[in-house]
Image (tube, rainbow, N blue to C red):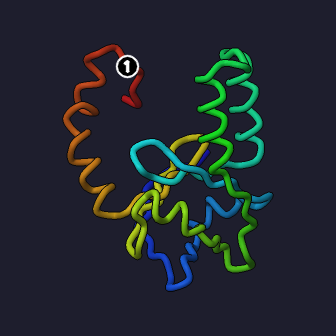
């Protein structure tokens, strides 16, 4: 499980040192892809296979929607192996998509991690904070 928020920096080559716990989870390699809200998703190979099976189970394979989801989702995926220092190099296409330049936040989201531009993450949290506080009153399971 990917947990926590980690303020980090990309180096001049676009490399990111993953948090130590994330390195352990991604030791078999990681798949990066375009995420929702203009972030980058990081997934294990196992999670990508689960997503593919789930999509196939709920979506007819030969519809325009299925083709678009698969093309844009799988087509933007990049397989990476962390180096000995636990760094991954973010491809320019994904850095541009998410507006990643220097300061980033890596957020653990259960079965994936997300890489956000730090300012975009702060704005997102500020926007969502009230809705999160209200989620308990809407019958959503909470940690309390």
Q: Position of residue 56 (x, y in %)?
A: 73, 22
Please name the residue shown 33% across and 55% down the image. 121
Quadrant in the rendering for residue 135: top left
The C terminus: image quadrant:
top left
Q: In this orientation, which residue lies closer to the viewer: 132 or 142?
A: 132
Q: Quadrant of residue 92?
A: bottom right
Q: How many numbered callouts?
A: 1
**Left or right placement of residue 99 versus residue 138 in this view:** right
Instruction: Give the crowd class for mark 1: few <14, some 14-19, many >=20 residues within 10 Å.
Output: few
Q: Position of residue 47 (x, y in %)?
A: 71, 40
Residue 78 in the figure: left or right of residue 122: right
Extreme residue toward the front, this view: 64
Horizontally, residue 110 falls left or right of residue 39, namely right
Residue 70, picture quadrant: top right
Q: Kindly give the residue lying farthest to the right in the view shown.
A: 28
Q: Nearer the viewer, residue 98 or 118?
A: 98
Task: Quadrant for the N terminus, please.
Answer: top right
In percent of width and height, residue 3 lies at 52, 49
Residue located at (66% from left, 15% from top):
58
Question: Which residue is disc 1 drawn over?
Answer: 140
Question: Does residue 80 lie above or below 56 as drawn?
Answer: below
Residue at 67%, 73% in the rendered image: 86
Instruction: Indicate the position of residue 122 as horizontal and vertical percent values.
Output: 27, 56
> Is residue 60 placed above or below 104 in the rendered structure?
above
Q: Residue at x 61, y 23 (%)?
A: 64
Q: Secondary structure at mark 1?
A: loop
């Amino acid at each position: 499980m990917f947990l926590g928020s980690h303020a980090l920096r990309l180096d001049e080559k676009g490399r990111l040192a993953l948090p130590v716990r994330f390195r352990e989870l991604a030791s078999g390699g990681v798949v990066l892809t375009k995420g929702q809200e203009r972030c980058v998703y990081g997934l294990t190979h196992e999670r990508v296979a689960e997503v593919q099976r789930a999509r196939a189970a709920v979506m007819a394979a030969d519809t325009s929607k299925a083709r678009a989801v698969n093309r844009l989702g799988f087509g933007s995926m990049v397989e990476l192996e962390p180096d000995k220092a636990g760094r991954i190099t973010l491809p320019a296409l994904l850095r541009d998509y998410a507006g990643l330049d220097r300061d980033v936040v890596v957020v653990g989201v259960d079965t994936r991690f997300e890489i956000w531009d730090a300012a975009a993450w702060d704005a997102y949290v500020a926007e969502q904070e009230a809705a999160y506080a209200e989620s308990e009153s809407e019958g959503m399971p909470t940690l309390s």
